[in-house]
Structure formats: C-alpha cells, structure tokens
Image (spheres, grey):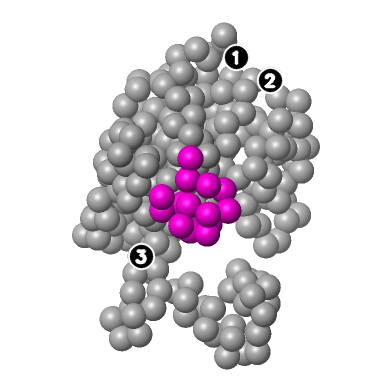
C-alpha cells in the first residue's frame, strides 16, 4: 500500500485533512479515553464492548451500541495495519481530550513497533484567539502545520506508555506526580493530567470542576442549556 496514515481527533480536523490535499489515508479517532472503563495495554473485545456501552449511554443511544462497537474495532484494526504504510502521522492539540488520545495511540503504536511515527501537536495558532483546538482551523491552516512534524522519540513512546497506563488504571498517585512535572518528553501532558485531576469530586462539595463551572454559570444567569454550555466552555 505505502503512503501516509494520518490520525487525528474530531471530524472537523479529519475533514480538513481530507480537503487539504495531503496524500494518504485519514483516520479520525473517536473515544473519550480519560473516562469510562479501560484496561492497560491493547483492548480486548470485552473492554471494547464495555466502552461501547459507556459511550452509548453517554450519547443517550443516539448512535447505537453496535455501530459504536464496530467503530472502535475499526479504529484498532487501522493500528494493526500500520505496517502497510510508509509512516504514521499524528495530528493533535494540547487539550485533555487530545492528550489522553495521543498517549494511548503512542502506547499502542509502540506496542506494535510501528515505525516511523511522526507527531504534530500545537497549543496555539497565529491569529486564532482563543485557540480551542485543531477543529478551528481551515484546511489551508492545517496544511501549514505539516512541516512542524517531528519523529516520535523512544523517550516519548515510553513516557506515553506510562501515562496511558496511569489513566487506564486511574493511578492517582502516579497522575498527581505527572501533573507536577516540568520537563517531560511530551510537554503538554502535565497540564492535561492536572485538568483531569480537577474533575475528581471535591472533598467538600463532591463536585468536579466542570460541574462547579456549570453551577456558577447558572448563578450568573445562564438559564438555557446553550447558555450554560457557552459560559462553561468560555471559563
């Protein structure tokens, strides 16, 4: 087969990659890998079924259990097939959603000894303020990031594997230490993990940060779901 395999999160960035003119196949990874049932290492069908049930419940059945399970299986099948490509290029940003996905993908690619793997990861883009992620970019803007890609190092693979295992097992001690790190092979991880830790129930209120922000928005007058969502996202 040959060519490039591009992997990203979010259909918006995936569609832009398709439209950018870059050669190769595009896989959009769809999973909330910092939440729900997990296991360290490559997932088996039991874990994928449990994750499908978790995602089906979270979307109130809008997608359907079987389509979600089949989509998860298809994603991992793409990782199994990386040897058919000349290289794998990962496109992600610095948010918790993307970073949890990134370390999981790096860990699994490392497990499969995929080579070479290249990474594009950004936490800002000129002229876009606030920058919320790759999904804001046009195909032209996304294409401009292509030359920023770097080959993933052994240290990055190993660090990603340790972070993914900590997230999968909810090892709070390990995650707390990771959140305090300053110099790490993947520099966006400590802030992302710190954000994950903020969602743990507060000892006094029992609420995570997202729930607290939603209540604060309501206190300030946001009375519709859209208004609450907008205020919470802005915060």
Query: For the C terminus, which image quadrant?
Result: bottom right
Give me the disc on residue 23: 2
Closer to the chain start, of discs 3 and 2, is: 2
Q: Residues within 10 Å of mark 2 (few under 14, many from 20)?
A: few
Q: Tell me if label 2 and label 1 are in contact, CB under 8 Å.
A: yes
- Mark 3–mark 1 distance (CA, rounded to whole Å): 39 Å
- Of 40 and 110, the residue lying toward us: 40
139 in magenta: no
Q: Secondary structure at mark 2?
A: loop
Residue 226 position (above or below residue 136): below
Q: Residues within 10 Å of mark 1 (few under 14, many from 20)?
A: few
Q: Secondary structure at mark 1?
A: loop
x then y, percent, for residue 106: 40, 34
- Mark 2–mark 1 distance (CA, rounded to whole Å): 7 Å
x then y, percent, for residue 64: 53, 47
Magenta span: 53-66
Residue 71 position (above or below residue 219): above
Residue at the disc numbered 3: 197
Closer to the chain start, of discs 3 and 1, is: 1
Give me the disc on residue 3: 1
Q: Which residue shows up at 58% across the image and 36% down it?
A: 28
- Mark 3–mark 2 distance (CA, rounded to whole Å): 39 Å
Q: Is residue 218 left or right of residue 37?
A: right
Q: Tell me if label 3 and label 1 are in contact, CB under 8 Å.
A: no
Q: Is residue 34 left or right of residue 56?
A: left
Residue 135 visible, this orientation: yes
x then y, percent, for residue 127: 76, 54
């Amino acid at each position: 087969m040959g060519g490039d395999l591009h992997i990203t999160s979010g259909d918006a960035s995936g569609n832009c990659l398709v439209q950018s003119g870059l050669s190769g196949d595009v896989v959009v990874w769809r999973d909330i890998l910092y939440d729900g049932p997990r296991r360290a290492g490559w997932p088996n069908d039991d874990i994928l079924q449990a994750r499908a049930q978790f995602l089906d419940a979270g979307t109130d059945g809008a997608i359907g259990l079987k389509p979600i399970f089949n989509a998860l299986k298809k994603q991992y099948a793409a990782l199994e097939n990386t040897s058919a490509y000349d290289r794998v290029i990962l496109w992600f940003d610095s948010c918790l959603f993307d970073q949890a996905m990134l370390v999981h993908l790096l860990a699994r690619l490392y497990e499969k000894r995929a080579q070479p793997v290249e990474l594009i990861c950004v936490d800002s883009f000129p002229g876009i303020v606030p920058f919320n992620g790759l999904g804001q970019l046009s195909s032209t803007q996304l294409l401009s990031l292509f030359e920023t890609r770097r080959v993933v190092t052994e240290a990055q693979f190993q660090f990603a594997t340790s972070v993914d295992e900590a997230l999968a097992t909810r090892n709070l001690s390990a995650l707390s230490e990771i959140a305090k790190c300053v110099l790490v092979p993947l520099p966006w991880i400590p802030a992302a993990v710190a954000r994950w830790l903020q969602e743990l129930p507060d000892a006094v209120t029992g609420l995570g940060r997202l729930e607290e922000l939603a209540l604060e928005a309501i206190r300030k007058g946001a009375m519709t779901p859209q208004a609450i969502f907008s205020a919470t996202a802005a915060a």
